[in-house]
Image (spheres, helix red, strand yellow):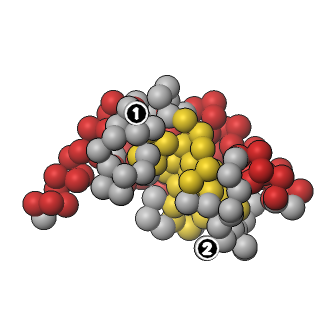
Amino acid sequence: MATSNAKTVAEYLDSLPPEKRDVIQNVREVILKNIPNGVVEAMNWGMITYEIPLSIFPNTYNDQPLMFAALAAQKNHYSIYVTNLYMIDENMEKLNAAYEKFSIKPNIGKSCIRFTKIENIPLDTIAEIIASTTVDEYMEKYKESRTWLKNG
């Protein structure tokens, strides 16, 4: 996985080749228009992250802000991390249905959607999924998942 040492989003964008920068900026605009109130954009883990600050939710397993979404340009593809894909079953169903309409098999990892061209992702559906969960709902789902992991 390609990571960046950039300290700011602007620095990260400036470090990308123009063709990758264009794709990342287009996807970033969609994320920013749909990200719920309380989520902030930052650089973390070598990529652009959209996270719930520790001032709002300090009790995370790794003492880092709670990641809501992320965006990165990798060596041979792009990645959008949409963490509520696995927290809410309907979100994965929506994403799979959108890919069926595209007649493209999705390239999905753990909360990660990989793509090589912006035309090959259902960006409207991803925007809808991002916008579908409030910060309070997300924090509650996170707490539930942590309880399950401790007991499971």
Residue type beneath disc 1: Ser
Label 1 residue SS: loop
The residue beneath circle 2 is 1
Q: Is residue 102 visible?
A: no
Residue under the image location 34 percent in, 41 percent down = 58
Task: Looking at the image, tell me whether mark 2 or mark 1 is earlier in sequence order.
Answer: 2
Give the x, y percent position of residue 98.
55, 50
The residue beneath circle 1 is 55
Q: Is residue 70 visible?
A: yes
Give the x, y percent position of residue 149.
19, 60
> Residue 27 or 43: which is nearer the viewer?
43
Residue type beneath disc 2: Met
Q: Which of the 4 image quarters holds residue 12? A: bottom right
- Residue 4 higher or lower than 93, as above or below: below
Label 2 residue SS: loop
* Mark 1 Cα shell of 10 Å, populated few (<14), some (14-19), many (≥20): few
92 on left or right of 2: left
Which residue ends up furthest to the top in the rendered image?
A: 37
- Residue 20 higher or lower than 123, as above or below: below
Q: CA distance from mark 2 to mark 1?
A: 29 Å
